[in-house]
Image: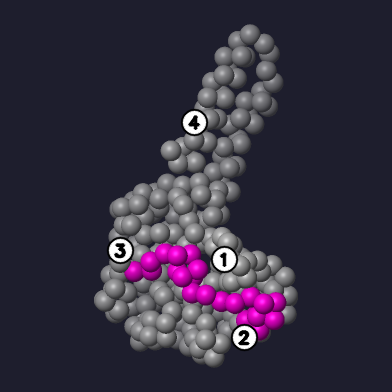
Amino acid sequence: MLKFHRIIVLFAIIMVLTIVSGFFTPIHYLVYVSIAAIPVIIVVFGSARVCSGLYLESYCTAKNKGRVLGLTFDDGPDSRTTPLILDILKEHDIHAAFFCTGEKAEKDPGLIRRIDSEGHIIGNHSYSHHFFFDLFSEKKMTSDVMKSDSVVSGILGKKMKLFRPPYGVTNPVLARVLKKSGHRVIGWSLKSYDTKNTGKEKLLKRLVSKIRSGGIILFHDDRILTAEVLHEFINAARSKNYRFERPDWLLNIEPYE
Ligand SMILES: [Zn+2]
């Protein structure tokens, strides 16, 4: 049984037992409110964290791999920033995972081919990356995910097997969609916060201080800040004796069907 269902069943049982007890001894109304509120809080926080495992299993870190890191880039390809990032990765001989949106891939197939030909892998990050993707019906969500698969397979001739949820949000609908489509979810263990305007130095300092063995790091290749910090980040991680491995090798999973 999924964690989500177990939590709902557990709190339903607790609520029934509390109501029954209420017939024999006075129970403060706040006890009932708390029993109702706790699963809601768990579900809200669990949905917002891709690695919570509340609805589906996801790969977020590599265990027992030593001082090795995997780089992932979301929301591209972007004609302005993705080539800069690819140049830096090539210079350092690092292979990464790019979770592209189908809509952007469709607009720039040449960049998708370049990412692939330089030894990186491409994963599905939905077609639309719609703000309300998580509220889509099962049918609409399935169509969005499959459309992205079809765009990339039309360019590269291979079907993506890895999926990263837009905004890192998961829910029961997405769990059903991905179970049917056969995608595996890749999360992260360290978020770079390159989408926030924190400034290069602050971002770099925080990121370097938080790297851990087997970590999967989330960047965005449509951000100029990412291109600005990447070279220094790689050097700083290597100076701490970390090496980089392509995320699918690190996690021991197949990226394509
Ligand atoms: Zn995204």
Residue 231: give its label: 2
Q: Earlier in the sequence, mark 2 or mark 1?
A: 1
The quarter of the picture where the N terminus appears is top left
Q: Earlier in the sequence, mark 2 or mark 4?
A: 4
**Residue shown at the point (42%, 86%) measured from the top left:** 118
Amino acid type at circle 3 is: Met
Distance CA(mark 3)–CA(mark 4) = 33 Å
Q: Earlier in the sequence, mark 1 or mark 4?
A: 4
Element assignment for label 3? helix
Element assignment for label 2? helix
Element assignment for label 4? helix
Distance CA(mark 1)–CA(mark 3) = 33 Å
Residue 146: give its label: 3
Q: Is residue 113 above or below residue 49?
A: below
x and y, in percent, of residue 136 in the image = 38, 54
x and y, in percent, of residue 32 in the image = 62, 25
Distance CA(mark 2)–CA(mark 4) = 49 Å
Amino acid type at circle 4 is: Val
Distance CA(mark 1)–CA(mark 4) = 37 Å
Quarter of the figure with residue 190: bottom right
Q: Quick one: 24 or 68, which is closer to the camera?
A: 68
Residue 9: give its label: 4
**Residue shown at the point (62%, 86%) measured from the top left:** 231
Q: Earlier in the sequence, mark 2 or mark 3?
A: 3
- What residue does disc 1 label? 65
Q: What's the magenta region? A: 233-256
**Residue shown at the point (69%, 21%) measured from the top left:** 28
Residue contact between numbered discs 2 and 4, judged by CB atoms under 8 Å = no
Relative placement, left or right, of 56 versus 71 is left
Distance CA(mark 2)–CA(mark 1) = 23 Å
- Nearer to us of marks 2 and 1 is 1
